[in-house]
Amino acid sequence: MSILTLNCGSSSLKYSVFDTVQGTFICRGLVERIGDRGSRLTQHYAQNETCLERDCPDHSAAVQLVLGVLTEDHDSPLADMNSIKAVGHRVVHGGEKFARSAKVTQELIRAVEQVAELAPLHNPPNLAGIRAAQELLPDIEHVAVFDTAFHQSMPPEAYIYPLPYEWYEKYGIRRYGFHGTSHLYVSTRAASLLGRAVEDLKIVTLHVGNGASAAAVSHGKSIDTSMGFTPLEGLVMGTRCGWIDPAIVLYVMEREKLDSNSMDRLLNKKSGVLGISGQFTDRRDILKGAHNGDRRCQLAIEIESRSLKKTIGSYAAAMGGLDCVVFTAGVGENSALIRAKALEDLSFLGIQLDTELNEQACGGQREELITTPASPVKVAVIPTNEELVIAEDTQAILQGSFCNQDRFRYSFE
Ligand code: ADP
């Protein structure tokens, strides 16, 4: 049985096909520049890379293109459309309504439309993908998998901001948190790597990519997370500022006569390590710059690592203990230096880093511990796999066997 996963962004569509019998992904692909001239599909299947340039004026055209490439040729990944038994859709914002993945129904679509205001860049393309796929594959089940769902277990003291309470009631202003599928996946895999039940552990998960967020996962549940009402809050990111004094925003807007759109752009696109370094978003460039003596690249690394370290400490405090820290995503999986700096001087918490193991754990698909065998608190590097969460949730819902506790007990890849 094959499950198609779709992750629609404003101008892109990432997809994969998961074979539930083999427990592996058959192929993965990406359509870029949707709605623009020169849309381009790239697909990896077996050892082959397929590249196609075909105008896709909207998401419907992109989904149609994907289905064609998946099924039409004799050497395509799937025999025909009937091979697809269900579609799992990534939906960024589920608001307060969805604490788990769910079948797509008219009611679900209405609920996702209602929270679209909270995620104007993400939910509309997610919905466009759902509608297009439903139209082209009307007879199979479609499932929505929400980035926010895993964090719905947070208690009010974690998600209510110290702001006028009416803003929560009137506008839904609260911490929602994002990257939920990733935090769920890596925390569950970390437990498996330790040979323990996730329900017995207190874990800090650090998803550090271009966007970055942390979660305090206590007994398998997210009890706090760093991204908030939007993905702008929290850790230092590639181009997003994360935690700052909100008074700065008002001060600069007034001084530089900026409107809210310009300020939004500065905070989301021109801040973070790009803002500090003045040059780079990509941490590989930052690390190279720092190595070559660029003071601001060095500062960017210090500030980013410090924000990770402070978050580990505060989440350990919030959980009343710590068993494991997990690093994942582009930077978390690849940068031994940023991991080492984030963990520096944390032996008082029980973290004893094995510097050699840390240096060795750089990329690849392996799940590894980078602490000494005697370290009371373990640190793991775990490649994230958000598509697997989408595919597994879709399969589970299809079979009516959805159960949080039973997921990712073993790795599929
Ligand atoms: P996103 O999905 O948010 O775009 P990713 O998880 O793909 O992000 O991570 C992208 C980030 O990972 C980039 O800033 C990139 O520089 C960083 N990265 C990738 N490889 C390395 C590496 N070897 N060392 C340091 N950073 C890396």
Image (tube, rainbow, N blue to C red):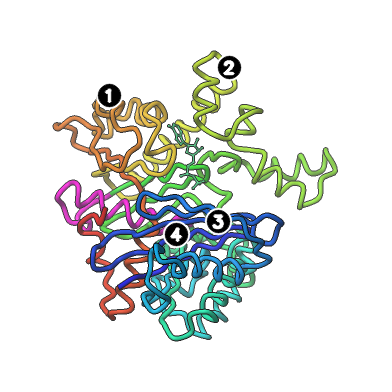
Is residue 91 or residue 377 the one in the foreground?
A: 91
Name the front one of labels 4 and 2.
2
**Going by the image, does 260 lie left or right of 201?**
right
Label 3 sits on a secondary structure element that is: strand
> Which numbered dot is residue 355?
1
Cα–Cα span, label 2 and label 1:
25 Å
Against 6, residue 363 (above or below) is above
* Kind of residue at badge 3: Leu
Q: Is mark 2 within 8 Å of ligand 1?
A: no
Cα–Cα span, label 4 and label 1:
37 Å
Identify the residue at image location x=60%, y=40%.
239
Label 4 sits on a secondary structure element that is: helix
> Which numbered dot is residue 295?
none
First in residue order: circle 2 vs circle 1: 2
First in residue order: circle 4 vs circle 2: 4
Against 31, residue 353 (above or below) is above
Name the front one of labels 1 and 3.
3
* Kind of residue at badge 4: Glu
Cα–Cα span, label 2 and label 3:
38 Å
- Say which residue label 3 marks: 41
Cα–Cα span, label 4 and label 3:
45 Å
Cα–Cα span, label 1 and label 3:
41 Å
Q: Residue 169: which quarter of the image?
A: bottom right
First in residue order: circle 1 vs circle 3: 3
Is residue 179 within the magenta segment? yes
Of all residues shown, which one is farthest toward the front?
Answer: 74
**Boundaries of the magenta span:** 178-202
- Say which residue label 4 marks: 157
- How crowded pointer 3 is (Cα within 10 Å; few <14, some 14-19, many 20+) is rated as many
First in residue order: circle 2 vs circle 3: 3
* Kind of residue at badge 1: Thr
> Which numbered dot is residue 294?
2
